[in-house]
Structure formats: C-alpha cells, structure tokens
Amino acid sequence: MPCTTLLVGKKASYDGSTMTARNEDSGSTGFTAKKMTVVHPEQQPKVYRSVISHVEIPLPENPMRYTAMPNANPKEGIWGAAGVNSANVSMTATETLTSNERVLAADPMVRLIPAEGDKAEVPGGIGEEDMVTLVLPYIGSAREGVLRLGALLSQYGTYEMNGIAFQDADEIWWLETIGGHHWIARRVPDECYVVMPNQLGIDAFDLDDAFGEQKEHLCSDDLRTFIAENHLDLTQEGPFNPRLAFGSHSDADHVYNTPRAWWIERFFNPRTNTWDGVDADYRPDSDDIPWCRVPEAKITPEDVKYALSGHFQGTPYDPYGRHGDSSLRGSLRPIGVNRNNFLSVVQIRPDYPEATRALEWIAFGSNVYNALVPLFSQVDGAPFYFENTGDLPSTESFYWANRMIAALADPHFGKCANQIERYQLALQSEARAIILRAEKEVAAGGADEKAVCEKANADIAALTRKKTDELLSGVLLEASFGMKNAFARSDA
C-alpha cells in the first residue's frame, strides 16, 4: 500500500525515546477500514497461511501478546500493519517501495502461480499482509526483528518490494527488500530522523560492516555476490549507494515520492538548506534528498503528526492554497491524503517502567482532519471505540467518525480549519494529561500497573469520542450551510 514512514532516533527526539511512525494509505481505488486490537498468544496460529499468496509457514512456540492495526474486514488477510509486543519491541510493516528492471530480472518476485491443468498451484512469497503476524510476536529486540524477517525473506521470498521498521528503547532498524529474496537493513543513527516515501531510500551502506561486525548494517548472506554478478553498483565515488543500485528513478517518483521527502525535510530543517527557487539545494523532484539527517530542533510526537499530515503548506503545491500559481495546486502527491487509513506513532522511552515504557499514538482517516491520541500498549485489550470498526459507517467507531469528518470538511476547508485545529489541540493536550497522571501513579508504586494503564486508555477513548462527536457536529453544520440548494426567505 502507498504509505509514508518517519523514524526518529533517540538523540533526535525531545525526551530520549525512539519513535517510529507510518501512515498506512489505501490504494487509489478504495478505502480500507482499520481497527486497533490486542492479539493474545492463544490467538496466534501454529501454522500461518497467507490469503494472497497461499504460502504456509510454521510458527515458533510461545508467541508474545502484541497490539496490531489489522483490516476491519479480513477477506484479504490480517494486514497487522503496526504494533508493540509484550517485550516493548515494535514493528511497522510495510512501506511499499519501488525497484528497477535490473534487480527484478536478477531476482524476480515470488508470486502465486495458480493451478492449471495437471500442474499444481505454486504458492508465492510473503508480503505486507503477513509480516507483522509472522515476526512481531517472536522478537525481543529491533535487531532480532531484522534477522527473523530476513531469514523468512531468504527462505520464502516476497512478491513485492517493501520497507519495514523495527524499534526498541535503544535502536531503530530499517529493512528494505531487494527483488524476491534479498534485503538490506541499516540502523537509524541516534541523532537523526529518516523520511521514507514509497521509494527505496537507503542512500549509503557499508558492506564491510554488514559482512563483518554488523554494528550498523545487516543484509542477506549473498548480497555482495548478487551485486557483483548483476553489475548493480552504480556508485561513482563514496560509499555504496543502494538507492542507485536497487531503486527507481522515474518521472512518477518526482510527482509521487520525492516531493513528500522534500516537504518533511524542509519542515525539520528549514534553515539547513535552500528549498525553493532556481538555486535550491533540493527541489520536489530531487533524487538525492538525504535518507537520514540531524533535525534543527528535537522532535516531538506532535511534530511527527504535523509532518505526516502535510499537504505542502507554505508552498505553491498546497491543494487548499489560495495564492500563487493555481496550476501548481494539487500537482504533487500530499502526505496527508484522503486515503490515509491510519497513523501509528510508537514511542518507546528507556527510563520508564516496563508497563508504561511504550506509548502507541494512533489516528484514523485523513490526517489533515484527525487527531493523534496516545495509548499504553501493555494491556489486554483495545478500547471499544478504537476496535469497533465494521464494514458500514458508524459514529460508534473512531475510524468511521474521522472518515465522515474529512469528507464533510474537505469541500469547506477554509471554514472548517479552525474547528479542526481546536479539536486537535484540545484532544491531544487532554489525552496527554491523562497519560501523565497514569505514569505518575505507576511510578509511585503499589498500584496494579496494568489496571492503571487500561483505565487511562478507557478514559482517553471516552474523551476522544466526546471531542470527535463535537467536531463531527460542527463540520456537519458548516457543510449543511454550504449546500447548493440553500435558500431562505431573506434570499428572495
């Protein structure tokens, strides 16, 4: 699925936490309803079978409990998407990536071959549908996540190009698949953030480290041979550049992918580079926008939300803009798009007790119009308002309420923007206050830690529903005033 990922190392964040965040976006032909849930060990299958590729994979014993953001309707599989396990390790999967003809010819995708005549079906590899279920319940660190998924990719292959993030309190690792069976992974530098649109992103990779001490780099066992035999290294000077070797450089990237990296990096580094004009260091169509960099200021969860809600504010490309060249408005693919399914921001804090160490901040629907709310992950269940996503619209569901708000408010953006901003500020402030009170209660000792966390989550869910219902009422009123058949006696 088209998505945008943002990773924040512990020295780049405001409180020393690691943060991983990703928008999951639907394809252009529809919208995928999502929910939050908690998966218990007894619910985990012993043998996993993919709906899309039909591959069957035996799973280890003793899985951990974990949160997930699956599809509300499982007809196309689980699509667990993002979550945190009981060891306070997180995973987000996946960021759909692009590749090139040389890679795909050398290591083709492993796709399902249906039965035909007397020929039996040949299962395909693993993909976004499967990865969280296959990996997250079985890993005790971010590095372990890379190694487990890497082994599965090497054994079973994949039918698509994907990027996957793993996170614990100390490290973030980013893995990119290469062709059907190969992969690379790089540790996110502690002082940096990483921006990933739907394009293979790592722009420097130390193969000596990957085949030596493996401090910052990991890869499939035969990657060096694979690169050499297929003449994939296009680097003229400097370290090996995987983006050149394995990625794409198409005109479509300059409309769909590179502009998103350009906008987020200009947000976090507005003075580091020149972003506009004929002498700009980087433009929306630049292929060399850095994979990782040090931000000008420490990054907060609220900053992550703003970045992943971006629609090119402050530039001529903003679809809601009122000034400048109107032909540029809406010409580039926004980050906060109508097809956002959910946003998950996982924050893991090293100095907190295990019960409160991980916060999973969530939002549903188009990020321009929603709010991000924090939840404790070490609990036995998700609040009803966040889990109750059915096939039909309902104000009983956080997902559907946000979808309705976005659809109503979008045609009246100028008149609804203030309501949206007030909602986001109030809900995010009050929800954070609930978290702070619960953290103090756990830190004081003597309390049932899980009960405290579950009550905080329930209080946040109740607050979220109240504020969201109020916003829905407000934008419905505004949209109703804007109907084309509006008429009053004073109009006569």
Image (tube, grey):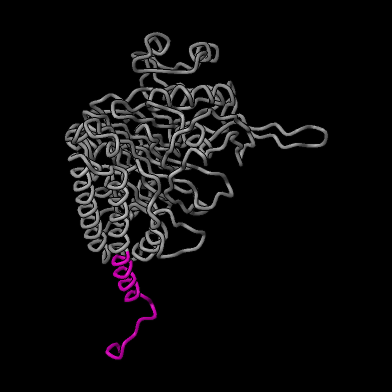
Instruction: Tell whether 24 sits left or right of 376.
Output: right
Observer-nearest of 95 and 155: 155
Image height check: is 440 above or below 147? below
Residue at (30%, 72%) from the top-left corner?
478
Q: How many marks?
A: 0
| Residue 315 drawn at (x, y percent) | 26, 48
Highlighted magenta segment, given as a residue range = 469-492
- One can see residue 365 in this view: no
| Residue 186 drawn at (x, y percent) | 37, 22
Image height check: is 185 above or below 198? above
* Magenta run includes residue 36: no
Residue furthest out toward the front: 446
* Magenta run includes residue 475: yes
- One can see residue 118 in this view: yes
Residue at (39%, 16%) from the top-left corner?
240
Instruction: Tell whether 325 sits left or right of 338.
Output: left
Residue at (58%, 20%) from the top-left corner?
106
Image height check: is 341 above or below 423? above
Observer-nearest of 410 and 12: 12
